[in-house]
Structures are given as structure tokens and as C-alpha cells.
Amino acid sequence: MAMDFERFKKINDERPNYGEMENPSVVSAYRNTGCGDGYRLYLNINPESQTIEDASYTTTGCGFSLAALSMACEWLKNKKITEAENISSEEIERLFEFPDRRKNYPDTAVDAVKKAINDYKNGTGIKPEDRISKTYAMDRLKEKGNLRDEKLTQVVLENENLENVDFTGSNMSHAFLVGANLKGAVMRDVKLRGAFLNGANLENADLTGADLRWAKLSGAKLDGAILDGALYDAGTRLDTKYIFLFDKMTQQGKESYINDKSPEEVIV
């Protein structure tokens, strides 16, 4: 059966079940080691009945990741934990069928769900004190006029306008900054390890000394950006046209891809 492209487009336009959840029972982070995409699952679980009352997600992945996670969250609602533990790709594809070359996306969504269930049972999800919400970050920005020296780990600031904001010294490791406008932002010595900056506008941003190890900047605009002394490793991804910026940076950790791979292979 051919994929329903109209429904695929509708899912991507409307993004059912997408977004942060207020006061979830568990927040689980999952990283696809194959492509580097990040997923987060938010589950609200009734502690007495052990029923999943609500489920949502965020992702840096493509439209197929979004569709798979949307369907997975829809399936999870009103399921007992014992049922959710046995989720399969087939359950997801009963809600939306993926083309043969994209069957890996429901498989990955299943892996993410099972990790979320284990995180709930074992108390190994993102700790409540590390669940920094967008509301908190934007309130602090309004209050202080900057976000210097803030703990912003795991924060989701996707597509936010943060032009010229001063983040100096903040911890933004594993932050979701996909599509954010960070033009002219001051990000000196900011911890951005494992952060997702896909498609972000970093034109003329000052990232001197920033920790960009395992950060994903594919599609990011880096014209005029200052990366002197910024840290990078094998997981730091830049588009081919910005490879020259590695010469300004400091390698720390695993050997960089650019030392043993062609420039085209740097792109994710």
C-alpha cells in the first residue's frame, strides 16, 4: 500500500501530541545514535491504576520521526504500563503506514517508548530539577534582560526569537534550539554539549570558548559567527560550507570526522 501523503502532510502540519507537558510523571530523553536525532517523551501516569493518561513528545528529527512519535503517543493514551511495555512497530503502523524504506522510524519510536517506560519504573528519566521549561527561561529573560549564568539544561526553545540575547556562562547542554533566532547572541563559554541547533540562525553570534561537543548544527547559519576556542569532537556536525570553522576551534575528545572522512560525510 502506498503511503498516504496527504495524511502525512496533515500530521506534520498539525503535529498531534507534540510539545512539552506540564508536571509529567516522567520525561525520557532518547538519542538516535545512527543519525543523531533527539527525542523526548513526556508521560503522565496515574500512580494508582498505572494507566498512561497523556503522552507527548518533542523531536529534532524529520517528518517521519514526527509522524512515528505522534502515532506512538496516540497509541499510548489510556494504556496500562504493562501494555505499553509491549508496544510494537505494528501497533504504530496500524495508525499510519510507513513506506518500506522508512520502516526504521516506527522501530525507533518503539525503542524510545520502551526507554521511557523503563525510565518511569526505574526513576532514571530527566530529573525534575533538570526539567527547565521554556516558560521559566523566557520569564528569566524578561526579568533580567539576559540569560547569563543560568541553568538551562534540556530546555526547549525551538523557533524562539533570541536575537542578541546574552547567554554567557550558561549551561545549555542537550538544549533543543532548533530553528531558534540566535543572531548576534553572546554565547561565550556556554555549555552546549549535545545541544540541537539544527537550522538555527547563529549569524554574528559569539560562541568563543563554547562547548559544542556532540552538538548538531546541520542547517544552521554561521556566517560571521565567532567560534574561537570552542570545543568540538567527532559528534559535532556542521554543514560542509562551514568546515573551515573547525580551524578556529579546539578538538577535545574523540577524533573529528573531518580527519578521516570526506567533507560530504560531515553533514547529517
Image (cartoon, rainbow, N blue to C red):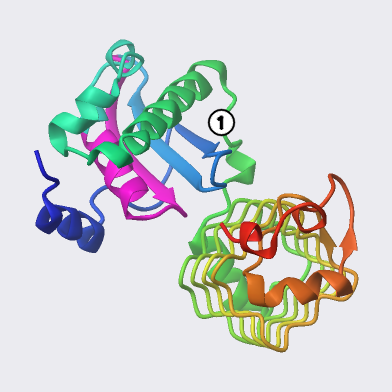
Q: Which residue is mark 1?
A: 125
Q: Is residue 257 left or right of residue 219?
A: right
Q: Residue at x 58, y 38 (%)?
A: 33
Q: Position of residue 40 (x, y in %)?
A: 47, 42
Q: Residue at x 43, y 52 (%)?
A: 61
Q: Which residues are magenta?
A: 49-74
Q: Amino acid at mark 1?
A: Gly
Q: Is residue 10 in sight in this rendering?
A: yes
Q: State the residue in front, 122 or 184.
A: 184
Q: Position of residue 166 (x, y in %)?
A: 72, 79
Q: Is residue 5 left or right of residue 17?
A: left
Q: Position of residue 238 (x, y in %)?
A: 66, 66
Q: Residue at x 31, y 19 (%)?
A: 84
Q: Residue at x 57, y 47 (%)?
A: 36
* Residue 243 among magenta residues: no
Q: Which part of the image, by quadrant, shows the N terminus?
A: top left
Looking at the image, which residue sits at the far top? 82
Q: State the residue in front, 193 or 125.
A: 193
Q: Position of residue 58 (x, y in %)?
A: 42, 50
Q: Is residue 69 left or right of residue 165?
A: left
